[in-house]
Image (tube, rainbow, N blue to C red):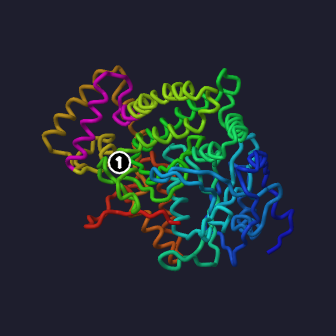
Amino acid sequence: MTQDKETINTSWNFDNSYARLPEAFFSRQEVNPVRSPELVKLNETLAASLGLNPKQLKEESGTAVFAGNEVPSGALPLAQAYAGHQFGHFTMLGDGRALLLGEQVTPDGKRYDIQLKGSGRTPYSRGGDGRAALGPMLREYIISEAMHALRIPTTRSLAVVSTGETVSRETSLPGAVLTRVAASHLRVGTFQYAAGTGDEKNLRALADYTIKRHYPEVEADKNPYLSLLREVMKRQAELVAKWQLAGFIHGVMNTDNMAISGETIDYGPCAFMDTYNPETVFSSIDVQGRYAYENQPLIAGWNLARFAEALLPLIHKDQEQAVKTAQEELSGFSNLYEGHWLAGMRAKLGLLTEEPEDKALAEELLSLMEKHRADYTNTFRALTFDQYDDTILFGTKEFTEWHERWEARRGRQEETKEASRELMRSSNPAVIPRNHRVEEALDAAGKGDFTVMDRLLEALSDPFAHSPEQAEYAALPEPSLRPYRTFCGT
C-alpha cells in the first residue's frame, strides 16, 4: 500500500532525539505491514492538540500510518531496549511488540512520543508474535482516556486500527494496533538496562538526555543526577497518591512500567475498585497480591530504590557514599506520598484547612467502607451531595458518629459550606470506568458495534460534571459469585 507522500505527511512534525542516544538503547526496525487495516477509533481532540489534522488522519493514508503500513516523513521507527524487575525478578527486556515512530513536536514546542503498540515482531520479542488483540487495545484506549479526564498523568491513546488479521492466544482473536502518545517511554527499566551494560558513558548519556527532556530545571545543579532521582521521586509520589484517591489499581507495577516522566503507562491488567478493600487484586497473574491496591505506594518506593541503584555511579564516585546519599533521598518518599494523599483526601472530604486529626478522620471512613463493603467512588459522591441513603453506610451507628465528627470538622473552617461542597464536586468523580461497563463495551466492539464504547467514553470525558446522563454509569454491577479478573492482554 503506497501513498503519495504529500498525502501521508501533511500533519506530522517528527524529531528523533531518542535515536541520537548510543545505539545500545534501541534497534532500528522496519515496519511490519498488516493485511487490511481499518480505523476503529480516532481521538480527534488529542490529534488536534498534537498539531495534527483529524480529517486527514481519517483518510486511508492516516490509517496506513496507524497500522504500520507506511512511515510518515521524518519518522525513524525503532524498538527501545530496557530491562525490568517483573514481580521482583530481573529480566532484560525491550519493545517486543511496539515501535517508536519518533517524537511529534507540537505547534507550541512540546514533544511527545508516537508509538505503535501491537505493530509486530522486533529483536526483543523473545518468541512472541509482536501483535496485539483488538480487545486489550480498546481497553487501553478507554482506561487511559478516563485517567486523563480524571486529571491523573497518563499516556494517551491517539488511534486504534483493526488489522484484518487474527492473533493466536488461548483462542484466535481479531488483531489491532494502538497508537500511544507519551511524554516519553523512558522507564526505570531503561536505566536498569543502561546500568546493566556496565558502560558508564551510556548511563550518563541516558541521564543527561532525561534531564534535558523532562527536568531541565536541574541541569545546572551541583549534583544533577541526585536531583534527577529527587524529581522522579516527587512525581511518582504524586502519581501513586492520585491512583489511590481514584481507586485505581495498575496491576503490574514492574520497574519497566514506571515512567520517568511521572505518567501512568502500560494498561494491562488494570481496573478500578468498586467495593473498598485494600487487598483488592484484579490481575490473574498476581497470585501473591504483590501489586494489590494497598501495596502500590510501597511498590513505588521499591521501584524508586531500583532507579537509585542504577544511578549510583553518577551520584558519587565512591559507591559507599553514593548508597548513603541515595538512601537519604529515598527515605523521604513515604512522607511525600502521604502529603499528596492527605491533601487529596482533604479535598474529597471538603476540607479547605488543615488539622492534625484529618488523617484519622479519613482513615476511619475508609475502615467503615471496608467493614460494610461500601462502594469507594459512590460513597464519596453520596457525601458530596448529602445523599446518604445512596450508600450502604447510611443508618449504621458508626457512620452516624463519624458523620457528626466530619460535620463538626467542616464547621471549624471559615470557608462556607458551599465552598466545601464545590471542592468535593471537583474532587469526587461521578463516574469511573466501571469494570462491567468496560467489558460491556469490549464485548459489543468484538461484535462490530462500537456505539457502546462511544457512549461510555462520552460519559467518562467529564467525570466531574455530575450530569443526569452519567447516572447509569455510576450504577453498580449485579452481584456475582466470581471475583472480577483482568489479564495482561499480550
Which element carries disc 1, helix, strand or loop?
Answer: helix
Q: Which residues are magenta?
A: 344-372
Q: Residue furthest left?
A: 397
Image quarter (top left, top right, bottom left or bottom right) of the N terminus: bottom right
Q: In the picture provided, is 334 more to the left or to the right than 306? A: left
**Residue drawn at x 69%, y 64% as measured from the top left:** 66
Q: Amino acid at mark 1?
A: Thr
Residue 159 in sight from this viewpoint: no
| Residue 354 located within the stretch drawn in magenta | yes
> Could you tell me residue 373's position as x and y percent?
23, 51
What x and y, as percent, mark residue 83? 59, 51
- Vertical position of residue 109 compared to residue 81: above or below: above
Q: Nearer the viewer, residue 406 or 262?
A: 262
Apparent side of residue 418 relative to residue 229 in the rendered image (left or right): left
Residue placed under numbered mark 1 in the picture: 377
Q: Mainly helix, strand or loop, the magenta region?
A: helix
Above or below, 232 relative to 89: above
Q: Quadrant of residue 262?
A: top right
Q: Quadrant of residue 96?
A: bottom right
Horizontal and vertical percent for residue 310? 59, 39
Q: Residues within 10 Å of mark 1 (few under 14, many from 20)?
A: many
Q: Is residue 404 visible?
A: yes
Locate residue 19, reporting x and y percent.
Answer: 77, 49
